[in-house]
Image (cartoon, rainbow, N blue to C red):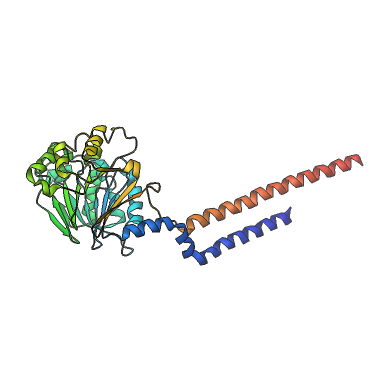
Amino acid sequence: MRKNLKIRILICIIFVGILCLSFIFENKIENWLNKDFFATFEQINECDFKVHYIDVGQADAIAIEFPNNEKMLIDSGESSSKEVLKNYLTNALSWNDDEKIINYFLITHPHEDHIGGGVTVFENFKVLNFYRPTVYTKQESNETGGFYYSSAIFDKVVEASKQEIDCVTMFFNNSTEMIIGNCEIDFLSPKKLIYENVNNYSPILRLSYNKKVFIFTGDAEKEIEKEVVLNYPIEYLKADVLKVGHHGSNTSSCEEFLDAVSPTVSIISVGADNTYGHPTDKIIKRLEEHNSNIYRTDKNGNIVIGVKSDDLLIFVLKNDNIPIKIELWYIIVPLAIGGCYIILTIKIKKSKDNYKNLKSKTNKKVKKA
């Protein structure tokens, strides 16, 4: 039995040794394991400009990579998806160095499904500029006046922003026009400083790059959409890509707005089997009537739209909804532990059974004698 144990231990040592030797060919093995990952992101990285519509469930989070390598994050999902957001941003975006810099972090309005991952963003990434609507925490309102929104998560995000950065901008209509890496961003709303409906603080943003137009809406509702249509020429509002308002709810995407925007592609950020019934059949039908190609995070996972020269390219990343580069350690360690366990326990158990059988036979012979 002891001899068998020594043999099993020797086999374990050889087994672990072979696995450890695989690190000599680490790069080749990892490239093979991640061939699909690299193929997809190699194609995405060939684009000059990229917008990532991240699958964070019944929530919103959009990452933009500009031609000058600067990055913007619009909203941060809900609290329950904060790790999903962190993993996606870490693995899917192109970072220049170990210090992961988000140049612009914008929250559209203070609802939890748009700011839930905000503290995690500040903790794990270096944010240079923070943009927020003209909504205040209760403490801020007591000090400066203005409309406040009472929410524990909103208080935490605002406090985290104050601790991490100095540059905070309160946005509203025409107050902020941005040019980033040949991209022009215009805040089409909100026009007022105070709204009864918190959703309407969401800015409708128009981003243009190389004659391609993207429109982002947050949860802005019909009132704001109609206001934008009245204040801007239809030609200016026509878009290639629309982030559909309020997760495809009936409260947004009115006829007038869709007539003006007339999106070639519509993206709906929505959770699977959500209790709100989003997106509604009415909105889906309305988008189809405008001949818009519809993509949904609940069905398609993460969606990346890139601009390469004059082309608009669409990538669907359904890999469990999070693209993750596989490290060799992810395989080696479980394999080594599992392999040794199997070799030692199963083989030794068989040796014990053989020993019992042998002892039983010996006893029988002794009795016969």
Q: Residue at x 69, y 58 (%)?
A: 7
Estimate the x, y position of residue 229 in percent, counting from the top left: 10, 42
User: Where does the C terminus fall, quadrant-wise?
Assistant: top right
Going by the picture, which residue comes out furthest to the left?
231
Residue 148 visible: no
Going by the picture, which residue comes out furthest to the bottom?
24
Estimate the x, y position of residue 357 in percent, counting from the top left: 78, 43
Q: Nearer the viewer, residue 117 or 297?
A: 297
Q: Nearer the viewer, residue 12 or 244?
A: 244
Q: Residue at x 55, y 54 (%)?
A: 335
Estimate the x, y position of residue 135 in percent, counting from the top left: 15, 44
Estimate the x, y position of residue 108 in percent, counting from the top left: 20, 46
Apparent side of residue 154 relative to residue 336 in the rendered image (left or right): left
Q: Nearer the viewer, residue 181 or 124?
A: 181
Q: Residue at x 21, y 36 (%)?
A: 286
Residue 35 visible: yes
Q: How many marks?
A: 0
Q: Nearer the viewer, residue 230 or 128?
A: 230
* Residue 114 in which image quadrant: top left
Apparent side of residue 364 relative to residue 103 in the rendered image (left or right): right
Q: Residue at x 60, y 54 (%)?
A: 340
